[in-house]
Image (tube, grey):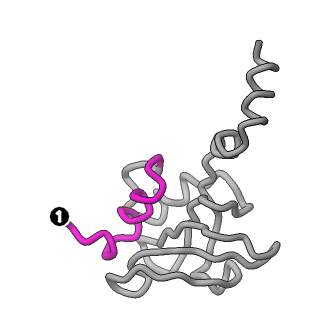
Amino acid sequence: MSNLACNCVLWARSQVPSLPMGLTTLAQKKAIINSQVPTVGSVAICDVGTQYGHVSVVRKVVSDSVITVEQANYTPCKITWATGTRKQLGGIIGYLDQEDKYIHHHPNLLEMVCMVRQ
């Protein structure tokens, strides 16, 4: 079994199972960006100055400009936490936000959506 801490994408997928396959290059990671607003559980896409880029998982939104992320392999083969701005956190260029996760965490909203669809 591979060490998930040595691969940011494999580790992030262990936390966010819907993270797509085929995310080796920065260009592939950029292609999945669907938000510029961080939310807890979204995947942050970073341009760290390499052809591969980096991903991390947003764990807390501290303010409009500061978030906390958990990530693998930013420090080689380690899982680490960091808090800072987009620039301080490795140059975050966008997020993969799981569009339906808000509904799943708010049962009343799911009930309202179901009523509207009927």
The magenta region covers 1-18
Q: Residue at x 25, y 72 (%)?
A: 3
88 or 111: nearer the eye?
111
Q: Residue at x 79, y 19 (%)?
A: 115
Q: Quick check: 92 left or right of 5?
A: right
Instruction: Kindly indicate the quadrant of the structure image that contains residue 75.
Output: bottom left
Main SS of residues in magenta = helix
Task: Establish if 101 lies above or below 95.
Answer: above
Residue 98 % position (x, y): 61, 48
The picture quadrant where one finds residue 116 is: top right
Q: Quadrant of the N terminus?
A: bottom left
Give the residue at x 67% y 46%: 105
Amino acid type of the residue that numbered disc 1 sits on in the rendered structure: Met
| Left-right relation of 2 to 11 | left
In the image, residue 55 sits, relative to residue 17, either above or below, namely below
Which residue corresponds to mark 1?
A: 1
Q: Residue at x 49, y 61 (%)?
A: 27
Does residue 83 lie above or below 59 as drawn? below
How many numbered discs, if any? Answer: 1
Whether the magenta-drawn stretch holds residue 3 is answered as: yes
Q: Badge 1, how many Cα within 10 Å: few under 14, some, many 20+?
A: few
- Residue 6 in the image: state x and y as whole percent: 31, 76
Q: Position of residue 39 (x, y in %)?
A: 69, 60
Q: Position of residue 50 (x, y in %)?
A: 44, 78
Position of residue 11 in the picture relative to residue 83 (left or right): left
List the single residue furthest toward the front. 108
Farthest-out residue, left? 1
Quarter of the image containing the C terminus?
Answer: top right
Q: Secondary structure at mark 1?
A: loop
Q: Is residue 111 magenta?
A: no
Residue 66 vs residue 95, the one in the foreground: 66
